[in-house]
Amino acid sequence: MAVAGMALNSGSRMWTPFKELHVLVDAAIFRKQPDAAHDLELALRKHKPSFISLLQNPAKNRIHKETIQKATTEGIMIMGQQGTQTLTQQFIDEALIISDLFSLNEYAAVELLMAGENQLSHFPGLTRGLVAVLLYYDGRRSLVNCLRTLIQAREGRTWTLGLSDDLVGMITRFTDQVMEEGLTNKILELVKGMDLTRELDKLQEDRALGNAKHRKQVTDLFKEIKLSLAECLFCWVCQSPLGKMETLQLIAFLKNDQSVNPDGTLDNVSLAVLMTLLYSIDVAVVEQEDSEDIMQKYPIFVDQTYVPAVHKEITLGQQWANLGVKALVEFAWALTLRTMSQQATGPDLNEYCEDDEYVMDSAIQEHVFTFVKDTVVASSVFHQEEFYIRKLHTLITDFIIQMPLKVKELRNRGDEAARIILAHAQEGLPPPTHLRTDFEELMKLIAGLYQKDPLKLELALEYWCPPEAGQNGSSFATVYHYRPPQRQVSLFKFVRLAGDLLPPSLYVPYINMLMGLANGPQCAHHCFNLLKFNGGHASSVSWDHFFLSLNQYYASLRQELPLSSESSHIPRYASRGITPQELYGLIAVLKLTRQVAEQDDSARIALCENQQWLPVVILFGVMSCSVPPALKAELLLTLAAFAKSPEIAASLWQSLESSQILPTHSQSVQGSGGIQVELDEVEARNEEFPMTRAFLDFLSVLTDIPVPAALGAGYRAPGFDPYLDFLRDSVFLKFNTRAYKNPEEKWQVSKGTLEVLYKLLRDHEILGEHFIDQHVEVQGGGTALANNPPGHNLLIHMLNDGGMLKMILYIIDEATKMLDRYVPFPGKEYLERTVLLCLKMIEVTLERQDQFINMLRDSGSSVMVAPMEKLLMGINPRSGKADHVVNIVKFVTYKNAVPEHALSAVKILCSVCQSLVVQPELVGMLTENENTSEDLLCGFVECLETDDVEVADVEEDEDEELTGAQIRNATRQNILKLILYTLDQPSPSVAHFLLGFELRKPVGKTNLQDPGVMGSPRTCLHSILTILDKGVGTRTGPLCLSEAPLLAELAYHTIYSLCANKDTSSPTMRYLRTTQDFLYRHVQHVPFRKAEFDSGPSSETTLLNQQSWLLKSVAIELRLTALNKQRSHTQRLMNLLLEDTLVSQQQGGMRPDGTFDPEYSYLEADRTGLSTTQFGQRQLASGGQTRRKVLQILDVIDFTQAYPAPMQFEFFDHSVIEQVISSCEQKNERGVVLCNVKMLYRILMNELNALQGSTAAGQRPLVAQEIESVLAYVVKRNSIRELLHGKRQAFQAWRHVVEVTLTACPVELLTGEARQNVLFELLQDLLLKMSDTDATPELTSPVAAVILTLMANLRQCFIMDQSELAQLQHTSQYVSLLDSSGVAAANQNVVFGQQAGSRTLFASSLQVVLKGLIEHVLRSSGGQQRVRANMYGALLYYLQIAVKPKPLPTLETVKNRSVGSALTMKESELEKLMRENLMTILGYGENFMEVVCRDACDGHDIGRMLSLAVLDAILAIDKHQVWLSYMVSKGYIQHLIDSLLHDDDKLQGMLNPSPEPLKALYIYESKMGLLTRLAETPSGAHRLLQCGIMGRLAECAFFDLRPESGRFHAAGFEETETFIPNIMIRYRQLLFPALRLCLAAMTSLGIENREVANQVLRFTVAHADIFNSILRDRHAVLSRPALEELSLTTAVIGRAASEGEPENDFTQGDTSYIEFRGHLSRIQHQLIALLPKYCMSESLKNQLKDVDAHITEDGRDTKAEINIAVLEIASNVVAYCRAVISKAGMSAQYCRIMFGPSLIEATSRDMHSFDDLQSMVVNSSRPPNLGIVVYQLKQCSNHFMTVFDSHKQHLRKLNTLGELSNEELKELSGGTSTEKMSSQQRQQLAKKRLVQILGYIAQELKLYFYIIENCLFILWRHLEYYLIHCVAADQGQSLFQMHAKKQALRRLQDGPSMNSFHKTELSDDDLSLNVTGVSKDDLDRLRSDAPVYINESVLKKLQEMEECYGKSHSRYGFTEGLVRRIKRLIKLHT
């Protein structure tokens, strides 16, 4: 039982090894793959026993059988599986049946059956047993084919396959070893034992045959095995001679062989063995120069027993089963003996050589010529085998040359026999039967041998030789100037002498021989000249004799025509003018004429132009006579041959019309006769249709040129209609109802008809004039409706459910039924051609119908048509179902037999799928029958899985000229185009059906599986993946890239479309990822590179497109896996793309085109400053170069492009040609605009044909040559455009991958140094490519957008959000990029994944990037605006790298907790980087300044905004103000300021309800941002003031267009975000920048500069109404935009009013000054009036609490910002009050008093009347009381401590983030929207939120403290005045007046902005307190209230605030000092 433990191979030892060997042999020998040679040698060693024991099955074994029988319980071991596997009883029974059937070992039978089960998906509808049978024969076929291929590859005498010497030597040695084991005898025994009938009976008996298709497959495999075995011997003997024993074995085999086909021809196998024997006894080698050496290798010369043994076996052996075979062998042997006799042979062989005559006589006696002609040459495969033809050609020519006497003897016998026959005929006796006709048989053999030449060998040319010069006066002497070889002279002599004095019996055979020898252009020309020369010798074989005889017949027959028109019943062919012998002669002559005319153009024209012969006239004349149909048919065929010349065809049209062969009008001479009567009465009765078929051929040739428009003009309406009606109605529609003697003639008639109809339909050009009825005059008066072009009428018939379409659909249905039988039948090839034409008719109709129907609809014609797709959906009357489309698609399943039909069927299906009406029903029709559905799917799969190599990119509409491989490739490509087109259609679509998606459930729920898994069929998706996977994992990469590039491109496109489609994406990507690992394996071979032998632009385009679709799929995969958190998949792909991989073993650099140059790296790096050593290619220790794959992909995209040189014309006008080319341009399926070369050619040729005159005639060749150059230029331009598009797509795909990797993939997969390294390398490579001076702008323009993205990512590597800082203070993972402390500076090579680098490395790299950005901006100046805009954006991101991030608001500025963080670099490092940036920028001088400033002032709007932002960023770091000086000196600042007023009208338009595009608004914001940046520096502010910035703002009218605020009072309305902001938001976008500019200028110039405040005041007063409206503040609810507006306004007015002295600018008493003061006073009063409202009262607190907490899209907290805005307003108002008070001076005695002495407001907990108080303050002269200040002080101090505690709590949470509960994290991170997040992500969000909250709280604390400080100061000043210096009004008038005068004097000295106490001296709007209102009671009440409301607790709280908060600020101690003074005042004066 040891053998029982043997594991079985589920792949089957009888199939899989042989199949793999066959693939390997094919790869090594035919595909010449270098890697396969070594593998082949190993495989041949392994399989040598299989070749030695050829086709011997492993023997049956009883033990194995018992083991198998027990497998139901004990199980059996299977290779690759653990444990044993039990088998079912049914499986075992089937295996044993297979074992008995093939006498096969039981284990092998089980393996075969298991393999059949595994392959079931490839054979739908079959069982595993039937599949196992197919695999058994397929394995045997593979083994035999391998042997045949190996023998073909041997070194030999006949052919060579172009393989390497080593491979050929290895194969030769191996096959010699196999041959030594008796291969010949084994093959012959196998062939003898293989009987198809017996084999099929045996299979049938065991039910091992399935349906008809399975039976045919088995039959074909069996026949192929048998034939391949015979061909093994044939290939061997062609290369190497056989020995004596092998030759005798061949003879013995042929003696007993009786295999013949039913038609009497030799069987293919017998023919191959016969040819093997003929080659084995061939001694033609003796004619070679080095024959002596070669002869030593031939057994026939070396082996002395060879010739005797063979001679004896041939001549004296046993009786031959087939005497004809014996005769041919004797014939060949006789020639061999004759050849040997001419050599120096030994005496032993002479006696045999002398028998050559005897052997030849024996062969001739046995009718060798007849046998060869009827059984060998007539074989269907003979003319397809080149070496068969050459062998017979050699035999016949050797016979003629080497045995001339024997030939002469045969001729003499023939002449004698002819005389005997003639004598008997004269006496009226039949000829004797014993006469020999050997010479006639020889001529017939020659005719048959050369009549067909499908391989274009032109062997007959050897029979033709021109006569020597001087021999005659022919033209040969002037044409030929060489001496032909003697062999050729002898053969030509035979041809010439054979025609001399021809007796009648040899006339027809000789003419037929000439016809056979004239098969070829040169041969036909020689034949024409021979017959022309013979005319001068009164020969019967000459053109003169031929046409003279025809003319005589015509003259004789014309006189016999009956005069009565009613004689049609008389048989016209029963004429006594032509005897049967003459008829045969005439037909032979006409055939020869036709052959010469068809083959030779010059002969054709010479015949027709000869005025003596006039062949056309004679032929048409004889046609009109009463002659037999066979002769008429030959006449028509001869005319068809003449019609091949267009100039002749044009005249033949008129001759045909005038001859009225087909009556076309009522005046016809023949009346109702002609071919119509012949068809209906003669041919139909005879059931033979030669004349009709000939007429169809004639029309087919005539329609190769356009039908003359005036055909038949005069007698009828001109046109083709009568002929079309005859073709359609009389022939095509009735062909199926007629009877036929020969069944195949039925399909010949239909084929001929459809050839003409299809040609007319295909060549028809649809024009609008065809749809308009036109009337013409006819002879005899009247008019008739003009005929439309035939194509027009055909389209109408095709688009109607009439007889023609029904017949076409009937033919298609009939063809599917007949082809489904898989058995041969008569006329099969004609049926196949017929149905192909039917398919093409439908295909062309579908292509043209849209244009036709549209024009028909536009013309208003009454013609009714229906779309073809709807007609195809009609009911089939034969089946009762709507299965026309199914019948058409069925041809895909016959692709092996009829590949062209499959291509047409796919195209039709694709066209039908474009109909939205039909598409939903298609899938239902295709899947209605389950078996049909499986067959169709299998057919599409088989079409895709052919292994043909794409030879050339051939236009599909030329598929009639395509080879079989090109047709199959076109079919594959069209199937993928069909899938691509229908993939986006609603499900279920045809694509879903073909790709295996669910059709009855949502497509997204499909679970794709491998074939056979869970019953899954093999689909087109599996085929696509199989095609793409071939070669993946090997060194060469995917084979399809080179073998089928167009198919590979479409396949990758299909994969991408499946991944991108919303329905198919999920199941497809899951299948590719889990089952196939498709993308990862294919990306390993990226970038795709061109093969060394392929350098065309089309191949480069295809490679780029293939790579593009793959990379786009990879980008989707990265995005989806990252989105679905499939981290491992994402990381694998990222590592593959970003890790270093080996590029080349060569030194040097990689050029963009993928080639390597040793000096490239150095030169390019030196030129651009980019370091390829650091971030480009890296050198390994082994010398190889490594580079990131993502950079390698970029390398193959060459950004340079060579364009064709401009055309130079001599005849055409350049501009006109360009216009014509532009008119022919169309978009292809890729979206590329290409010129339609065919359309252009047609236009140019029409121009050429329009040339007239003698001068033009001479120029025609030159014009034609120029047309060729135009077409060549256009073709080249098209290819360049496609290449440019391919490069753009390749870069776009690369961009997708890079951007998805950097933005969508998890950051933690690529962090820190690794991320920065990748970004630096990408940036430097891109900038390097863009720096190339030869780079095409069209290709480099998209690069700028990628650089923008990369710079944004690089900036993120340096600057993180503030929320990151809290974590970084605990960790030190991030090393500063500019800090060299922790990194070894020596480590220069930065590798992915390492944390390495140095300050110098990164800083220099940054500078290189900056230089690259600036240089590209300079290069692109004046170029594309989009490019510069992107570059400005990138430059902005770069400049932001050096901006120090804001510190965490911890209220501690001394400590810095983020030291060592990459995001909080040391200030010195930042300053260094900033300084280096500035030095780099300044290094480019004024050129760069000019470009940026010019773009800021003019250009595209986005470019202007970005350039303004760049200016802003540069000015921010330009400490030396070089740029500012330049901008001022060149007037750019002045221009920007003046442009504000220039844009005033546009900005006013921004405030319309329906504004124009808001670009003017955004440009204004950018300008103001830049001007604000300038205003932030003192010098900049001075420059702005000098340029009149405030004056321009004051003049701008758009500020005065503030909308009514009442419309926007609704809560949140102003904050509602829409695409176009509402008017109020737009207005504030205009106002806010101006206010910020004012603030910046006043801040930078300080309080000492009164001028800026004065100008701001003038701006304010210029728009006083607007600011009054803002300060009036009538918003009922708190709105963030409104509060922000009020905050800015109060800040600006407060600062300006307190610091400015505007009265200096006015003259005393000026009315404008009074008006100015009035506006200003009103504004100031309204400002003061805001104090009560924005006091932190309880009501205000409640309003703030009621505000909804809302986080905007940009992350801002609305509630917190409202709170801050309120505090800002309050701080601005109290700051204004404090400024006014402090401005009066240091003495309290003379200070400004703004508040009354009452503290009544401080007594209330909440002042509900503050709003009333505000209006009172505004409308009366009494100022507010000091109690408001005290109340504000108390409230702010209380709120401050609360907020301070909140800050500490949040800061503690931030520091202990990891300890927070889930609820707290959930609350901080956003609630329910984060439920699916990980804890780490939630912590990140919580951290970000905490940092934001801390920032808001820090702002609140700052504002609270600022308000408290100001309030304390105001309170101190007022208390000091009231308690110490103030005198009550009722204490004495004189004292008071004296005191008041002093105060007034003081205030007048302060300037006009300060008001006096005296009411009489000031306006009613005086801000100062009217002291007359202060009574002694008021002062006493103040003294009593002050200690109460300003008590110790309040002051102590203020001191605590100072202690806990004020220490960290520069004003520490200020609050403490004020508190002490207030305490002292209260204590001493109350």
Image: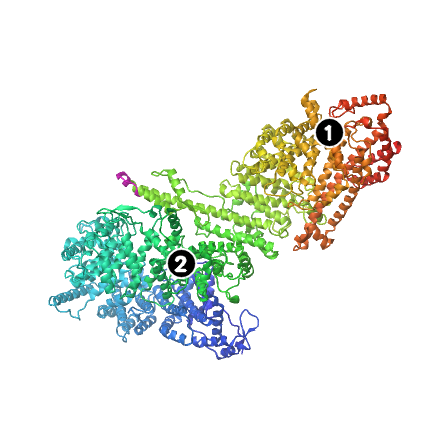
Residue situated in front as seen by the camera: 256 or 170: 256
Can residue 954 be seen here? The reply is no
- In the image, residue 1918 lies in the stretch drawn in magenta: no
Residue assigned mark 1: 1698
* Visual colour scheme: rainbow
The answer to whether the residue labelled 2 contacts the one labelled 1, judged by CB atoms less than 8 Å apart, is: no
* Amino acid at the residue labelled 1: Ser
Residue 791 located left or right of residue 1907: left
* Amino acid at the residue labelled 2: Leu
Q: Write down the quadrant of residue 829 in the picture.
A: bottom left
In the orientation shown, which residue stands out farthest toward the left?
427
Residue 117 located left or right of residue 1811: left
- In the image, residue 1250 lies in the stretch drawn in magenta: yes
Q: Position of residue 1073 (x, y in %)?
A: 55, 59
Magenta stretch in the rendered image: 1249-1258
Mark 2 / mark 1, whichever is N-terminal: 2
Residue 741: which disc? Answer: none
Residue assigned mark 2: 872
The kind of secondary structure element at disc 1 is helix
The residue carrying pointer 2 sits among few (fewer than 14), some (14 to 19) or many (20 or more) residues within 10 Å by Cα, namely many
Mark 2 vs mark 1, foreground winner is 2
